[in-house]
Image: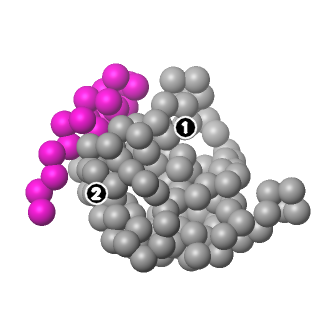
């Protein structure tokens, strides 16, 4: 199914981000996998394509207005849930070490699948409670 990425492209442009075709494809893959897995497990209440673009992907990328992600060495996303903001940041910038921490094993398994399917590197998915980790 062809997707209209105008919302994502315009939002990224406002953030000073120009996405490559590979990154656009990764966002589409992430969306498709998120919606498919959401049918059997509760990952998000937001599943409409344009809403996911804005409320999950673009919201996750907003921190680039405050932080130069190309200079970041390590990110820990505590209570990542379905991978927000960690996974969109990883798609945007592949050169930092990313740890995704969540207390629910099924979500961590989902994130490991996303990492593998999207070919994302330097991602560690941890099943633990934040206060214990």
At a point 64% along the width and 39% down the height, the residue shown is 72
Say which quadrant the N terminus sits in: bottom left
User: Residue 38 vs residue 107: left or right?
Assistant: left
Q: Crowding at label 1, few (<14), some or many (≥20) Cα neighbours within 10 Å?
A: few
At a point 88% along the width and 62% down the height, the residue shown is 132
Magenta residues span 1-18
Find the distance from the CA under tag 1 to the CA under tag 2.
Answer: 23 Å
Residue 38, image quadrant:
bottom left
Q: Which residue is mark 1?
A: 70
Say which quadrant the C terminus sits in: bottom right
SS state under label 2? helix
Q: Is residue 130 visible?
A: yes
User: Residue 80 vs residue 113: left or right?
Assistant: right
Residue 64 in the image: x percent, y percent?
51, 30
* Mark closer to the observer (1, 2): 2
- Magenta region includes residue 16: yes
SS state under label 1? helix
Residue 11 in the image: x percent, y percent?
32, 30
Residue 81 in the image: x percent, y percent?
58, 58
Q: Classify 1 as above or below 61.
A: below
Circle nearer the N terminus (1, 2): 2
Q: Classify 88 as above or below 72.
A: below
Residue 58, image quadrant:
top left
At a point 59% along the width and 63% down the height, the residue shown is 123
At a point 37% along the width and 72% down the height, the residue shown is 39
Q: Residue furthest left?
A: 2
User: Residue 121 vs residue 34: left or right?
Assistant: right
Q: Which residue is mark 2?
A: 28
Of 43 and 130, nearer the camera is 43
Residue 10 in the image: x percent, y percent?
25, 29
Of 103 and 21, nearer the camera is 103
Q: Is residue 92 visible?
A: no
């Amino acid at each position: 199914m062809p997707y209209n990425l105008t919302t994502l492209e315009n939002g990224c442009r406002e953030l000073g981000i120009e996405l490559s075709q590979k990154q656009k494809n990764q966002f589409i893959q992430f969306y498709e996998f998120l919606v498919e897995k959401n049918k059997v497990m509760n990952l998000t209440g937001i599943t409409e394509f344009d809403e996911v673009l804005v409320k999950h992907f673009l919201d996750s990328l907003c921190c680039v207005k405050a932080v130069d992600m190309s200079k970041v060495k390590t990110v820990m996303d505590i209570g990542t849930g379905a991978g927000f903001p960690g996974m969109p940041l990883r798609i945007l910038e592949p050169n930092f070490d990313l740890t995704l921490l969540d207390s629910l094993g099924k979500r961590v398994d989902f994130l490991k699948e996303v990492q593998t399917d999207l070919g994302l590197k330097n991602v560690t998915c941890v099943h633990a409670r934040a206060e214990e980790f």
